[in-house]
């Protein structure tokens, strides 16, 4: 029996399958890196740890990322994208938006606290925390309604009461439940907004030296 293989058809299929396998391996390595970042300081993580967690060889890790520096740069970008996807732009409904935030901290809060503790000694941690601060402030600015968005004091105070350290104080240090943590952070945010709406002046306040 003569079997005829259509090379024009099989070659694109093989290329597509190869690209998919490459992307899957890359994602497995990055997921392994994120998982280890939750368990160890960044400076303690070596390529062999990540390779073992991802069930690949060190050579495979290097083939995808060239070096440890390249891998951690990619981890930074990968983690930032995951965070942006989860912390969607606020809807303007504070109860719902705070729920999203607390759920986000349940997944990323401990890692964020760890990176903050390393930022003065680890440039990679510093890059992540700097971007994280900017992302959080932007999220808060979208949270605030138009009548208060130009009041710097409102933004500053909401940044504080919705910060990951506030979550840590309630959830980890006090040992409160997720729901109780949510309720307290929501109460703090409502308090800031109600106070400033009650005392709002026609001219938004600016930072003072």
Image (cartoon, rainbow, N blue to C red):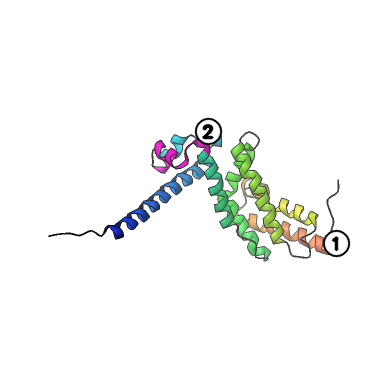
Judge by depth and name the residue closer to the eye, 17 or 84.
Answer: 17
Query: Quick one: which residue is furthest to the front in this view?
Result: 8
Mark 1: give few (<14), some (14-19) or many (20+) Cα within 10 Å. few
Q: Magenta stretch containing residue 68, yes or no?
A: yes
Spot occupied by residue 189 in the image (x, y as percentages of width and height): 72, 58
Residue visible at 53% across and 37% down? 69
Please identify, in this view, whether the residue under mark 2 or under mark 1 is nearer the observer: 2
Spot occupied by residue 124 in the image (x, y as percentages of width and height): 59, 39
From this viewpoint, is residue 39 visible?
no
Per the model, the C-alpha gap separating discs 2 and 1 is: 50 Å
Judge by depth and name the residue closer to the eye, 19 or 125.
Answer: 19
Residue visible at 67% across and 66% down? 93
Judge by depth and name the residue closer to the eye, 2 or 95.
Answer: 2
Spot occupied by residue 41 in the image (x, y as percentages of width and height): 56, 36
Q: Is residue 180 above or below residue 66?
A: below
Residue visible at 72% across and 50% down? 160
Q: Magenta part of the protein: which range?
A: 53-69
The disc, 2 or 1, on the residue closer to the chain's N-terminal end is 2
Q: Which residue is mark 1?
A: 199
Mark 2: give few (<14), some (14-19) or many (20+) Cα within 10 Å. few
Judge by depth and name the residue closer to the eye, 12 or 102.
Answer: 12
Query: Cβ–Cβ below 8 Å for labels 2 and 1?
Result: no
Position of 164 compared to 74: left or right?
Answer: right
Q: Magenta stretch containing residue 184, yes or no?
A: no
Q: Which residue is mark 2?
A: 44
Position of 49 compared to 201: left or right?
Answer: left
From this viewpoint, is residue 125 visible?
yes
Task: Determine which quarter of the picture holds residue 5.
Answer: bottom left
Please name the predominant secondary structure of the magenta segment in the image: helix
């Amino acid at each position: 029996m003569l079997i005829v293989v259509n090379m024009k058809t099989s070659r694109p299929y093989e290329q597509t399958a190869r690209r998919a396998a490459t992307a899957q391996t890359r994602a497995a390595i990055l997921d392994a890196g994120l998982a280890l970042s939750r368990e160890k300081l960044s400076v303690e993580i070596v390529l062999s740890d990540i390779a073992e967690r991802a069930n690949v060889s060190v050579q495979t890790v290097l083939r995808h990322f060239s070096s440890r520096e390249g891998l951690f740069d990619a981890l930074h970008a990968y983690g930032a994208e995951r965070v942006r996807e989860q912390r969607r732009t606020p809807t303007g409904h504070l109860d719902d938006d705070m729920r999203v935030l607390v759920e986000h901290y349940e997944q990323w809060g401990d890692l964020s606290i760890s990176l903050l503790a390393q930022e003065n000694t680890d440039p990679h941690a510093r890059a992540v925390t700097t971007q994280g601060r900017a992302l959080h402030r932007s999220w808060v600015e979208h949270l605030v309604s138009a009548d208060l968005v130009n009041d710097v004091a409102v933004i500053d105070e909401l940044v504080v009461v919705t910060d990951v350290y506030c979550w840590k104080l309630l959830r980890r240090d006090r040992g409160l439940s997720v729901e109780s943590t949510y309720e307290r952070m929501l109460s703090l945010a409502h308090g800031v907004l109600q106070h400033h709406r009650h005392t709002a002046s026609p001219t938004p306040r600016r930072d003072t030296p």
